[in-house]
Image: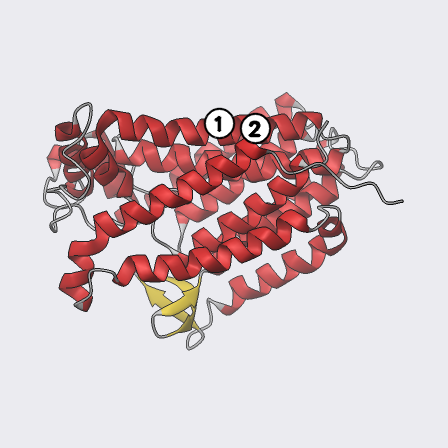
């Protein structure tokens, strides 16, 4: 008789559903004014978010009920599809330019962002590759360089769009997998130094990125240009105080904070719900990360452990960067807040990945 697996981690599930519900409320609250002004429909953003949330929940249900070991078999196929999409998006006439970046595939206002799906594709493949019993990642040339080369290829394709934020999240989650797989600290230290140098070169190569750095260091040096977003974000967070101005009562969403329903949605949340609301969201993310890492530690096989680390790392890196930008601790990067910000590809991808994590939790001790 086949033994049934335990139910998924209830704490993980509650955190996911709670963050998704908060996100729906905040997408409407933060984006209603802009939606009415641009589309004549205050519900424009939240209706689309509900559609993608529905698709994401279906995908999450599917991945939560699918034995995670099946992804080990199809990891290479998933990665090749993601790479093909990254190449396709760069072809004029196929890729769609939005916000100055050729990052989308789609028709009219509907589309997908292949770089978002590459994050999960890379996690699936690296987890499968580095968990092989015969793989020796402690060797720099034979063990560490091959996955780094693959990561560099994917990062390069993403940067051709360009999309530094998504590329950074993918690299961050991937490096956590490499570290967990047993890479030597001295090798990682050398890579960190060379990575910092490369990151500085990427910033220097594009004037707008350099402007974001200078604006991060002193936003008031260009309050109507590069420093505008950070200043307006802080203007939103400050008045929020302990309990906030009240749901729907934000002043900064009236064409002050640019695109308040996406990258800077946390500043509107802090303005309306205050310190209590902001800390509630951060607390939910902390519990999600804690339960996810618990799965990674207690699951019996290496592949499952690396897969859990990668998914949790993807969420954690994205949250740290987004919140860091919103409160002025990091330069503006264009990273959404998982499960909270408006965005079809990012929401669908995140729910799909978290469904895999829920399935992993069924096998944890």
Query: Are there few (<14), some (14-19), or many (20+) residues within 10 Å of tag 2?
Result: many
Q: Position of residue 271 (x, y in %)?
A: 18, 34
Residue 187: quarter of image: top right
Query: Are there few (<14), some (14-19), or many (20+) residues within 10 Å of tag 1?
Result: some
Question: Do residues under tags 2 and 1 come within 8 Å of each other at their CB atoms?
Answer: yes
Residue 291: image tag: 2
Looking at the image, can residue 153 be seen?
Answer: no
Question: Residue drawn 73% across and 44% down?
Answer: 128
Which is nearer the eye, 268 or 333? 268
Secondary structure of residue under mark 1: helix
Secondary structure of residue under mark 2: helix
**Image side of residue 100 versus residue 229, left or right:** right
Above or below, 20 relative to 87? above
Marks counted in the figure total 2
Q: Position of residue 98 (x, y in %)?
A: 32, 64
Quarter of the picture holding the C terminus = top right
Q: Position of residue 3 (x, y in %)?
A: 83, 40
The residue that disc 1 covers is 287
Which is nearer the eye, 111 or 5? 5
**Residue furthest front as drawn:** 1
**Residue furthest bottom as drawn:** 93
Q: Position of residue 250 (x, y in %)?
A: 14, 41
Name the colouring of the figure.
secondary structure
Which is nearer the eye, 143 or 74? 74
């Amino acid at each position: 008789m086949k033994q049934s697996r335990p139910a998924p981690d209830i704490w993980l599930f509650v955190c996911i559903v709670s963050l998704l519900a908060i996100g729906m409320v905040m997408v409407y609250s933060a984006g209603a004014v802009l939606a009415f002004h641009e589309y004549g429909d205050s519900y424009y953003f939240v209706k689309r978010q509900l559609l993608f949330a529905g698709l994401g929940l279906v995908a999450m249900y599917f991945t939560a009920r699918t034995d995670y070991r099946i992804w080990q078999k199809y990891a290479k196929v998933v990665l090749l599809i993601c790479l093909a999409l990254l190449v396709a998006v760069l072809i004029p006439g196929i890729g769609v330019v939005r916000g100055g970046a050729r990052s989308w595939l789609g028709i009219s206002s509907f589309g997908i962002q292949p770089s978002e799906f590459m994050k999960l594709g890379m996690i699936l493949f690296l987890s499968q590759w580095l968990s092989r019993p015969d793989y020796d990642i402690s060797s720099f040339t034979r063990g560490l360089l091959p996955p780094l080369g693959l990561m560099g290829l994917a990062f390069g394709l993403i940067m051709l769009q360009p999309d530094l934020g998504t590329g950074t999240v993918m690299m961050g989650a991937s490096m956590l997998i490499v570290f967990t797989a047993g890479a030597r600290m001295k090798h990682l230290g050398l890579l960190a130094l060379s990575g910092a140098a490369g990151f500085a070169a990427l910033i220097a190569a594009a004037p707008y990125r350099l402007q974001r750095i200078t604006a991060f260091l002193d936003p008031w040096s260009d309050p109507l240009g590069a420093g505008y977003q950070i200043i307006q974000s802080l203007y939103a967070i400050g008045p929020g105080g302990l309990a906030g101005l009240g749901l729907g009562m934000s002043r900064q969403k009236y064409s002050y904070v640019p695109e308040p329903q996406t990258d800077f949605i946390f500043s509107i949340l802090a303005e309306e719900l205050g310190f209590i609301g902001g800390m509630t969201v951060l607390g939910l993310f902390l519990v999600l990360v804690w339960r996810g890492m618990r799965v990674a530690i207690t699951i019996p096989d290496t592949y499952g452990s690396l897969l859990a680390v990668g998914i949790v790392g993807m969420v954690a890196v994205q949250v740290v960067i987004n919140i860091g930008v919103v409160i002025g601790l990091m330069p503006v990067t264009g990273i959404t807040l998982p499960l909270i910000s408006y965005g079809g590809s990012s929401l669908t991808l995140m729910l799909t990945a978290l469904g895999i994590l829920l399935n992993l939790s069924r096998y944890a001790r």
